[in-house]
Amino acid sequence: MDPALQKTFTFLSFIVLGFLLKKKFGKEQVNGIKTLILTVALPSTIFVALMGVEINANMLVLPVLALAFNFIIYFITPAILKLLSIEPDSAKGRTLKLLLPSLAPGLSCFPFILEYLGESSLADAALADVGNKFFVLIFLYIIAMNMYYGIKGASKKSSKGKVKELLISLVSEPINLVILLAISLLALGFNFESLPTFLGDTFSRLSLIMTPLVLFFIGIAVKLKKESLWPILNVLLVRAGITLLISTAVIMLMGIQSTNTILLAIVFPLSSCSFWPFAHLSVFSKKEGGSGKTFDTEYAILVLALSLPISTMLILGILSSGDFFANPLVSATSGFALLGVVLVTQLIRKLSASSFNWQVNENKKLIEQPE
């Protein structure tokens, strides 16, 4: 069997194991596993990866590109919602405006980049995520705040304190601290080999638990409900299709030739939606009561639950295919195919609804006719 496929089946077995054992884990335990991933395993893995690369000015390009992608998706999200017959100014629409442009590569992308593309590509992905972190922690909070005040017409006096708090969290988050530490050490001429042995071994051993832990987390965390399943699936497939087209355009415009770099540019933007926008909208949802809320928290949970496995399957499928998706024609065709599937599905649903309504009206006419 192909080594890439063997690796994929190994990954899937961890996910299946987590899914089978999910009933044995409570909400607090699941959150504990997520915390362990984001504060210990993932920072250790990123530190090991970054300490093995040479620092240069070109590294600044990566977070800028990631940030540009976030903004592109944010500005075209209203058009996506209208295409799928979702009102952009509704509670669900505002919720999707926050979720769709965000990325959570730590849970859905980094483990696979490490296993398939290596530590160098993981280091590049970690640097790119700095731009994404700025977007989800700062910009999306400000947007959520403006949406809330736009609906409620409340005072903005207390917003400065919260923005300051988020700026502090951006600096103090373990992943960002590790990135800053690694870059500082590299700038001073240190590398992984020059670190004290006990320190290097500690980070190395902690990084080994990341991949199985993330996959197990995916299995126990996914919660799918039948209601709203297909509409959310359509939204996420459109997001993935547009992402593939944007990635292909960037690859062609920049003239990227390296297979690993091309695959990284394709899979990183396919990461699942981030939990941070959900945290932002939850803050404002707690202040509201009754109908007419600014955001729909239950809908947001469903989006996050479905986004994680979909992104995982797409990323695994692309990386396990070797260099097949390194061809821009393949990635662009795949993007159009995803969009086409959704458009055809939408058309069929509309035609079915129209046919059903016509049949109901005809039956009413027959009933109302005098004998």
Image (tube, grey):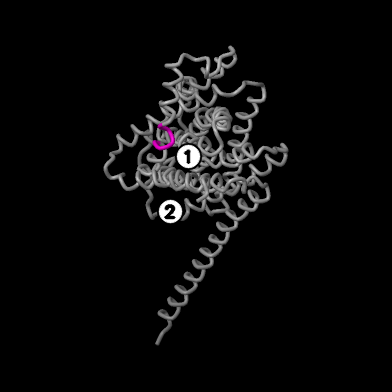
Determine the residue positioned at 65% across, 51% down. Answer: 330
Look at the image and give the residue range highlighted in magenta.
Answer: 209-213
Q: Is 364 in front, or is 328?
A: 328
User: Which residue sits at x=47%, y=28%?
Assistant: 45
Q: Which mark is drawn over residue 241?
A: none
Residue 91 lies in the magenta stretch: no
- Estimate the x, y position of residue 285 in percent, counting from the top left: 40, 36
**Quadrant containing the C terminus in the rendered view:** bottom left
Residue 118 picture location, percent across and down: 55, 34
Determine which of the numbered discs, if any, sits on residue 229 in the image. Answer: 2
Q: Position of residue 356 (x, y in %)?
A: 47, 70
From this view, report whether residue 239 is shown above or below residue 345.
above
**Nearest to the observer: residue 273 or residue 211:** 211
The structure residue drawn at horizontal position 57% and vertical position 27%, both measured from the top left corner, is 127
How far is disc 1 from disc 2 in space, using C-alphas?
Answer: 20 Å
Residue found at the far left of this picture: 24
Q: Nearer the viewer, residue 228 or 216?
A: 216
Callout 1 secondary element: helix
* The quadrant where residue 68 appears: top right
The kind of residue on which mark 2 rests is: Leu
Which callout, 1 or 2, points at the residue further toward the start of the chain?
A: 1
Q: Within 10 angstroms of label 2, few (less than 14), some, or many (20 or more) residues?
A: few
Q: Look at the numbered discs 1 and 2 and tell me whether their residues touch, using CB distance below 8 Å.
A: no
Q: Is residue 230 above or below residue 168?
A: below
**Could you tell me if residue 158 is visible in this image?**
no
Q: Name which quarter of the figure residue 279 lies in.
A: top left
- The residue where tag 1 is placed is 108
